[in-house]
Structure formats: C-alpha cells, structure tokens
C-alpha cells in the first residue's frame, strides 16, 4: 500500500489535465455513444504504457531521439486536423449536435480516432513511460506503484465517461455543444502549437 497509493495519486494527477484524449472521452460520454469501449480503450492504453515505464522502457525511449521528434510532429498534425473538425462542428451548429442523436461515427472509427489521439501524443509517453517509470524506481515495490497508476486510469476514464451524463441537461441545448466543440478545437490547437514549439 505504501507504493500503491503514491502510484494512484501521481497517475490520477497526470491524467487530470485537460487534453485531447479527455476531451474526446467527455464528448462521447455526453453523447452516450460507445462510452464503455472508449473508456476501456483509454484505460488499457494507459495500462500498457505504464507497464512499459515501470518495466524500465523509459530509458529506451530516451535512447532513441528521433522517436520523440516523429511523434511530436505526427501528433501535432493530427491534433490540427482534429481541431479543425471540431471547429467546423461548432460553426455549423444545429440538430447534428443533439446529445443522443449523432450516430455518424461507427465504433471502429471512434476507436481509431481515440487510438490516434492517445498514441500520437508525445505527452502520453513522457507522462506514463518516462515520468511514471522513473518515479516508480524510487519505490521498493514498483509493481504496486504501477498497479496504483493503472487503477487511477480506470477510475478516471470510467468516471469521466459515465459522469458526463450528469451534464446532459446543460448539453440538451445545441448552443452548449457549439461552445464545447469550440473549446475542444482551441484545446487541440493549443496542444499542437505547444508540440511544435517544444
């Protein structure tokens, strides 16, 4: 437990920051569209990355300098495109933004978009593989630390995905969806700019 709780706390703190992945999960939760699979995919992706970090692969990632550059520019390009899609949705507005009425994305397309948002983001590797991996080395029980960090991902993503339903009355109005889409677009572009200026 002395290693589990610090792992849980640090993992939860790192995930809590608003980013591309969290915004996507929130949007899917509000729409009640593929929520379980979206939350499970995020949590399992984090579990794989955290396991890699705790196992010592953080040092390997630092030893391959070109990997970070490729991920950074690829991630920035994807975030710019995804932000443009949300900006277009915000601009159009209308009935297409009803909380439970948008079934345009299949489960396959939803998960492919989510996987791109997750695995093309260099910050994910820095937070999970490098940071959590290096911090875990300070604990006697690295496995317990890693399990705590993985549990925090499951708690956070399922809480965000299913907790979003409490906001449904707010998002019953198309204008709320327009504002959310605009904020998501700005968030994506801000992250992309940060990646390009690193």
Image (spheres, grey):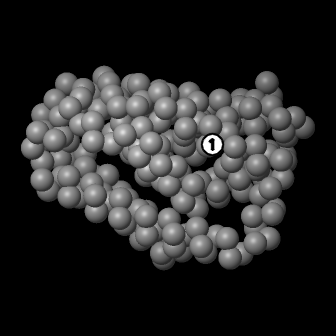
Question: Dot 1: few (<14), some (14–19), or many (≥20) neighbours within 10 Å?
Answer: many
Q: Look at 17% across and 34% down and name the residue there.
A: 98
Q: Residue furthest left?
A: 94
Q: Look at 71% across and 31% down and name the residue there.
A: 148
Please, is residue 164 above or below residue 188 in the view?
A: above
Q: Look at 44% across and 50% down and name the residue there.
A: 113
Q: Position of residue 125 (x, y in %)?
A: 64, 56
Residue 121 as seen in the image, left or right of residue 50: left
Residue 114 as seen in the image, left or right of residue 51: left
Q: Quadrant of residue 103?
A: top left
Residue 73 as seen in the image, left or right of residue 92: right
Q: Quadrant of the N terminus?
A: top right
Q: Which residue is mark 1?
A: 46
Q: Position of residue 25 (x, y in %)?
A: 42, 39
Q: Position of residue 57 (x, y in %)?
A: 80, 56
Please, is residue 43 above or below residue 77 in the view?
A: above
How many circles with numbers are drawn on the protein?
1
Q: Quadrant of residue 97?
A: top left
């Amino acid at each position: 437990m002395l290693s589990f709780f610090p792992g849980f706390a640090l993992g939860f703190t790192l995930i809590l920051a608003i980013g591309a992945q969290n915004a996507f999960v929130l949007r899917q939760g509000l729409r009640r569209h593929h929520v379980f699979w979206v939350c499970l995919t995020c949590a399992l992706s984090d579990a794989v990355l955290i396991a890699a970090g705790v196992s010592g692969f953080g040092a390997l990632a630092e030893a391959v300098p070109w990997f970070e550059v490729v991920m950074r520019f690829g991630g920035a390009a994807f975030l710019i495109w995804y932000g443009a899609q949300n900006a277009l949705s915000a601009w159009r507005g209308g009935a297409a933004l009803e909380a439970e009425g948008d079934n345009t994305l299949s489960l396959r397309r939803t998960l492919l978009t989510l996987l791109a948002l997750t695995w093309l983001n260099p910050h994910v590797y820095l937070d999970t593989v490098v940071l959590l991996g290096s911090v875990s080395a300070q604990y006697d029980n690295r496995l317990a630390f890693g399990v705590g960090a993985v549990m925090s991902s499951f708690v956070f993503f399922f809480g965000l995905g299913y907790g979003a339903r409490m906001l449904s009355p707010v998002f019953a109005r198309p204008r709320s969806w327009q504002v959310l889409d605009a904020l998501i677009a700005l968030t994506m572009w801000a992250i992309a700019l940060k990646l390009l200026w690193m």
